[in-house]
Amino acid sequence: MTHATVLISGASVAGPALAYFLRRDGYDVTLVERAPDLRDSGYAVDFRGAAFDVLDDLGILAEVRGHETKMRGTALVDETGAETGMLPAEAFAGELEVPKRELTRILHRITAHDVEYVFNDSISTLTQHDSGVAVEFERAAPRTFDLVIGADGVYSKVRRLAFGPHGGVVRHLGLSGAGFSTTNYLGLDHSGVLQHAPDTAIYAFSAGEADRLTVSLSFATATPALDRCDRQEQEQALRTAFAGRGWEAPRLLDAMTEADDFYFSSACQVHLDRWSHGRVALVGDAGYCAAPTSGMGTSQALIGARTLARHLAATNGDHPTAFAAYEAELRPYVTQNQATGAEGAAMFGGGGGGGGGGR
């Protein structure tokens, strides 16, 4: 299969990984990303199980290992800061953990020479025809592609345009939170600290950069509506949720306001009856997010990308057959991960901790 054209929306993990495999199989690939450049935010990401085979197939396993955070564990503390227990590194870091920004940089580097990247733009309309998909962009001129793949996250624009509104598809798991970084005033060294109470949790860790403290503030929410609010509203919701909390809460709330890498999201899952519609398919969180509490988001994105590419290659571009085989193979794996994600969120709701694995 050569010279068939594919448009991928989203330049995080699933999108560039899929682009690599499709380009290797002879497709002409364009990747559109609404951010002006590679995203430098996000927690560390971890890898488990078959994800290592995908990293090896991408030819980047050794390089990724070179960025391992080498976390040693996470101390549990009470509201006074007194240690009450210890979690092993594997509770958060999986079998291998690296800063997300390093993974996205590597994936971009191995694809940038033969994949067309279009930053600071997004898809505005999709119109399917028998022979292709007519795509209009917010900024670029209209183009037509043989296939369009959504790898653009929980609130996927591709999914909304091709499958319908987010309502009923995105399921909230009762947990929202913010991430940001500040100076490592706690003096953590490749370690973390977790303080939790019913409906709230504070998690902070320091890994690759000794002077950098990465912070997660999580709290119980009834809906994911805050995801669509501006930063001021999100910060106010966090201050309300953590009002009266002891330990480092007041200082971290102040640091949150000063942070230039503030990020807010809710623990949600994506449940669809099908992952493709005509010439449009979904991969990663856009099609089947299992939530951060599953600890499987990055692994699932990589495995999903390779599985989709493998079936397109095996069917010589017969996309209906390939899309059906991709879903049939991957759905049991996704179902298991989503069950784990729901269990992790339920533990938080009972005061059992926040954030889960897979930072």
Image (cartoon, helix red, strand yellow):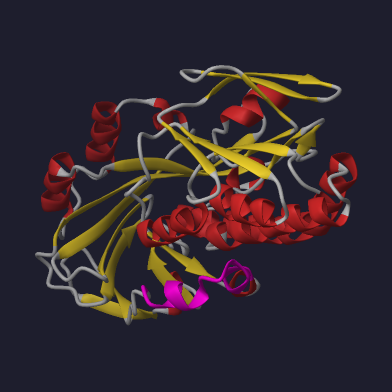
Q: Give the image location of residue 127, x and y in percent.
A: 72, 17
Q: Give the image location of residue 113, x and y in percent.
A: 49, 51
Pick the residue in front: 104 or 70. Answer: 104
Residue 266 vertical position relative to residue 345 in the rendered view, above or below: above
Question: Does residue 287 appear left or right of residue 292 in this picture?
Answer: right
Residue at 24% from the left image edge and 35% from the top image edge: 235
Q: Is residue 61 magenta?
A: yes
Pick the residue in front: 124 or 72. Answer: 124
Residue 110 vertical position relative to residue 275 in the rendered view, above or below: below
Residue at 58% from the left image edge and 66% from the top image edge: 58
Question: Does residue 320 appear left or right of residue 21 in this picture?
Answer: right
Is residue 164 at least partly visible in the picture?
no
Q: Is residue 358 magenta?
A: no
Is residue 274 at least partly visible in the picture?
yes
Residue at 15% from the left image edge and 66% from the top image edge: 80
**Residue 97 falls in image quadrant:** bottom left
Which residues are drawn in magenta?
Answer: 54-67
Q: Give the image location of residue 210, x and y in percent.
A: 16, 71
Residue 221 vertical position relative to residue 87 in the rendered view, above or below: above
Where, quadrant-wise, is the C terminus in this rendering? Answer: bottom left
Q: Give the image location of residue 340, x and y in percent.
A: 62, 61
Question: Does residue 173 appear left or right of residue 216 in this picture?
Answer: right
